[in-house]
Amino acid sequence: MIQIANWNKILIAVICALGLLYAIPNFFDEELFADMPDWLPGKQVNLGLDLQGGSHLLLEVDIATAVRERLESIEDSTRRMLRASKARYQGLGTANNAVTFRLRDSAQIETVRTELEVEYQSAGFSALGTPLQEVVVTVAEDGAFKLQLTEQAIQEIGQRAVEQSIEIIRIRIDELGTREPTIQQQGKARILVQLPGVKDPERVKIVLGQTAKMNFHLVNQSDSVSQAIEGNVPPGSMLLPSGETGSDGRPLRYLVHKRVIVSGEHLVDAQPSFQDNRPVVSFRFDTIGGKKFGSATSKNVGRLLAIVLDEKVISAPRIQSAILGGSGIITGKFSVQESNDLALLLRAGALPAPIVILEERTVGPGLGRDSVEAGKVASLIGLALVLIFMIASYGLFGIMANIALFFNIALILALLSALQATLTLPGIAGIVLTIGMAVDANVLIFERIREEVRNGRTPISAVDSGYRRALTTIIDANVTTLIAAVLLFAFGTGPIKGFSVTLSVGLITSMFTAIMVTRLFVVLWLRRARPQVLPV
Amino acid sequence: MKLLRLVPVNTNIQFINKRLMAFAFSAFLIAASIGLFLSQGLNLGIDFLGGILIEAKTDGPADISKLRREMNGLDLGEIKLQEFGAPDDILIRIQKQEGGEKAQQAAIRKVKAALDSSVVEYRRTEFVGPTVGAELREAATWAVFSAIGAILLYIWFRFEWQFGLGAVIALLHDVITTIGLFALLQLEFNLATVAAILTIAGYSINDTVVVYDRVRENMRRYKKMPYEELFNNAINQTLSRTVVTSVTTLLALIALYIFGGEVIRGFSIALIWGVLIGTYSSIALAVPFLLYIRPARGGEDEADEAASGASAS
């Protein structure tokens, strides 16, 4: 163990030098290294959201709604198809994840079935080259049809909904002006959003949480709202709440026709603006939307037109005259920020399905700064205490172990910077813990050397067998801790992952510095000083 | 220079003879931990229960009782409010709201609206929905059990099964009493605590492995020595290392406890406890326990060098 080959010495020196080189940028201003090419050391440790401040949001897309909407559209197209082929049917509806109806004339069963199957072939092909079905059609002998989405189709709908949601969330976040957001899918239906340095997390959550599905409906003015509230909602109409409060102090409700005059899909632009000094949102339709809007408004002058956002009436102004230009304004009880946000939502488009926030972890910039500061102070003081204790206990060998500890910390920082791993507050705790535990390998070795000296060995032989004997112990002891750290990484989330990363990195670098670096020092010193007695 | 020696040279403390005392003490600790766990329960954080946590800096020293009155007027169920490390720093915990994820967000907005006049900065807002809370609970349980299992396997692979069993008993002792400490002090038990427990598991095993390694070495070297004496020697021979490493680790952790800030104080307490109990258990439990299951002595030659190889069982 006291023979170290020259190439080995060079390797140890190179690793330590690289460690220093990659660790150094962390002690300077980041700007200084901004222009360096990527492969040069210039990266700093990536601070986690808990240290730099920011929001971590875990969202879930309501896939069941996306599936239900697809079934509803299948119901619609089935109705059109049955009418077109003049088949007589009854009881067409959607229930229990299936579209069902009954054909009156059993002679038509086969033709209708073939038509439906052709209609709902999906774009893909199976491995055998036969077209895949989006919908499975089953028919009972009495002509009862049942159209069910295949398992694969349901999965595809879910995946598409999540992908589209990610796109729309990205647009919304970009428009809010957040720097360097991370938006990624997690699992089947979840989206992880990380927003470093976000200023107003509450506003972000409001903007992200809205589906923003906007539709224009005519208000049903011929039936009574109060009767509808009591439960007599006329067919073809629906009762919707609004943001306005009525004279009785309760939210005003509107009875509107279910039929959509124009849907928000046709919007091409929306901007916040002012009318009579009140914030409003102006919008513009595409050609088709503009035409629909024009004809609907010209036919219904004098009636109330409800602007419905996510099943809630924003306002229901009277149509003064036909609006033919394809653009208009939305009035309502907005604050300036609300009109900004609404315009933003309409520009970005609606989410394909509602989303909910499952988890939020937001840290303000002040706490982040304080945590970094506290972490620095704790690490430095912890380090100082350990350094002093090591010198007091092992003298010259303690100094060598301390230099190795110094390289160890440099290597941890270097690895974290180079891997661009995220340093979190528990991660800092991991580094502090590593500082305390890193000297363990050296302690094991030094104690063993002491023992060998007591057993009457010469200095060189004591060092040699001290290292040899301690080695297996060091490896066994560190591997068990590493097992715990790796499992922590596998099961942990966010900051805890950061802790397990620094702990694992620290264990590995401390084994290297204790076994290789200190040993190099000790061996070089032995060769030079040729001591008769070891100072341990 | 006179070097510091926490443990005198050639100690010969009779640890093994005092094992029954240690067993009784540990049995008491474990019984008390389980008792506290069942009676007081753990102060589970929002990570596992779901709920909302807000930390805020107030405009000058916070009037806790006034704020508490205001919060409880919001009709959001039980709201806990406390000072957090400084007089102008408050921590608010709101229990899980009825009515799904949307209701939770509404509650956050409501609380913030009520606080806005006295708060200068929201330092933390954490919300964990019921779904995620249940998942985190499950993941944490898995992490702890699979870590213990994996460590057992590794020790079994590297040593004889008797050592694996002894190590895991000491480990379980450390984990159970750590949980007991959290129940006793009613410290918040959250994800960071689980991380601390796993780290304690790692440290405890680390410590046990070092002593076991020496036991194994001595077993190969002194074939005729009675187990009591052999185990006792192994503990005494490694005692200096055990104490020095515990001290350096404790020095670092105490620095973390004092200067590391309020957020990780509970985490530091757990680790400090873990180092103390982990050191105790490897000496007082892990090794004496081997007396009762008597690992087989290796069949190698009675040679000095036999101990140096990395040859596993």
Image: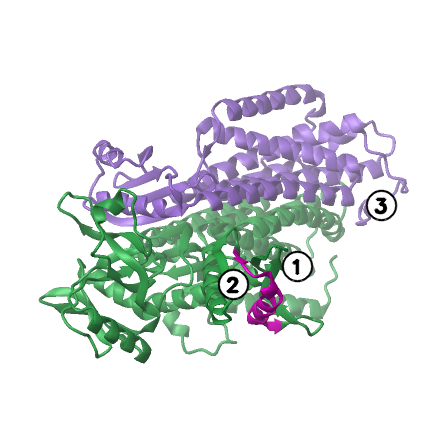
Tags 1 and 3 on a common chain = no
Residue that mark 3 sits on: B306
> Which percent across, then down, holds residue A219?
23, 59
Subunit that carries the residue with mark 2: A
Subunit that carries the residue with mark 3: B
Q: Quadrant of the N terminus of chain B?
A: top right
Q: Quadrant of residue B211?
A: top right
What's the residue type where badge 3 is placed? Ala
Residue drawn at (77%, 45%) of the image: B158
Residue numbers of the magenta segment:
A99-124
What's the residue type where badge 1 is placed? Met
Chain B visual colour: purple
Judge from the rendering whether residue A109 lies leftward or rightward of residue A452; answer left or right: left
Q: Nearer the viewer, residue A396 or A175?
A: A175
Chain A visual colour: green
Q: CA distance from mark 2 to mark 3?
A: 65 Å
Q: CA distance from mark 2 to mark 1?
A: 56 Å
* Residue A114, numbered label: none
Residue that mark 2 sits on: A157
Identify whether A212 is placed above or below B3: below
What's the residue type where badge 2 is placed? Ile
